[in-house]
């Protein structure tokens, strides 16, 4: 018999069972956003468990962005934030990035996401949103020669395409990708001349979106991201050091 089929069946942890029950109560609407949960003592009595299990369950729910733990007060049920979910994935993302093809896999993921965003913008962006993209592009051009400012305006321009969707999950994923691939930007821009090339790529993307041409927008973002990728790997080969963002 295969070893994996042998051995005792492990029971779920008590704290996990508490998490499941409280999550169900919240997701089913039995407990609503803005409500407070029972006290630790009441939860212990209701479930017939000890304080450590209750506290571990509440900590897990807080980490998932479902409740807020407040000193001296009962836990408050809050609206889940997609960014909290992505933050919880940061350790996993770092592991994947450390693997041989990790960066390339994330680069491919970013390309899929960015293509969808610029095609949607070309088809559906309002004139006000396109004006905002043009302003972000102008700021990017003005920042040429100032590496730190150029990177930030680069981030701001790409974020304009994500934020216009008004989809908090897309925004959270985009923000997470920005953090996880921050080193790519710093290494790819390893010489001042590359800022000009990067800006030209940005200009082509915005021009295609403003022209309402999704195919041209896709071609522009593909070319831009391939340039970024090529410059990144060239910088890595030259031993250009990366840098972490100021904020996680």
Image: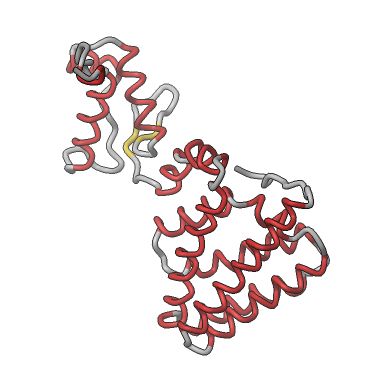
Residue in the image at 57% along x and 66% along y: 158
16 horizontally vs 205: left or right: left
Instruction: Pick the residue in front: 113 or 77.
Output: 113
Residue in the image at 23% along x and 30% along y: 20
212 horizontally vs 60: left or right: right
Quarter where residue 139 is shown: bottom right
Compared with 34, 182 (above or below) is: below
Compared with 164, 174 (above or below) is: above
Q: Quadrant of the N terminus?
A: top left
Compared with 163, 47 (above or below) is: above
Quarter where residue 244 is shown: top right
Residue in the image at 62% along x and 79% along y: 134
Q: Position of residue 178 (x, y in %)?
A: 57, 54
Residue in the image at 28% along x and 10% along y: 50
Q: Position of residue 233 (x, y in %)?
A: 68, 56
Residue that extends furthest to the front in the rendered view of this protein = 1
Q: Position of residue 168 (x, y in %)?
A: 41, 57
Q: How many marks?
A: 0
Instruction: Pick the residue in front: 50 or 88.
Output: 88
Q: How is the image coloured?
A: secondary structure
Q: Position of residue 5 (x, y in %)?
A: 20, 19
Instruction: Pick the residue in front: 150 or 53.
Output: 150
Quarter where residue 116 is shown: bottom left
């Amino acid at each position: 018999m295969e070893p994996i089929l042998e051995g005792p069946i492990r029971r779920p942890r008590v704290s996990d069972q508490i998490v499941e029950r409280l999550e169900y109560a919240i997701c089913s609407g039995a407990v609503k956003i803005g409500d407070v949960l029972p006290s630790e003592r009441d939860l212990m009595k209701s479930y017939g468990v000890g304080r450590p299990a209750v506290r571990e369950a509440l900590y897990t729910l807080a980490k998932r962005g479902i409740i807020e733990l407040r000193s001296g007060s009962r836990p408050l049920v809050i609206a889940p934030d997609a960014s909290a979910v992505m933050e919880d994935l940061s350790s996993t993302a770092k592991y994947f990035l450390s693997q041989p093809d990790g960066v390339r896999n994330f680069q491919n993921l970013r390309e899929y996401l960015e293509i969808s965003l610029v095609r949607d913008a070309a088809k559906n962006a309002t004139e006000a949103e396109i004006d905002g993209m043009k302003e972000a592009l102008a700021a990017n051009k003005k920042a040429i020669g100032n590496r730190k400012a150029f990177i930030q305006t680069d981030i701001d321009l790409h974020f304009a395409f994500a934020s216009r969707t008004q989809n908090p999950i897309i925004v959270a994923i985009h923000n997470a990708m920005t953090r996880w691939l921050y080193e790519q930007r710093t290494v790819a821009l390893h010489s001042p001349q590359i800022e000009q090339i990067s800006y030209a790529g940005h200009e082509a993307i915005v021009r295609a979106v403003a022209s309402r041409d999704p195919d041209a927008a896709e071609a522009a973002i593909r070319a831009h991201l391939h340039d970024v990728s090529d410059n990144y790997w060239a910088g890595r080969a030259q031993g250009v050091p990366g840098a972490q963002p100021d904020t996680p």
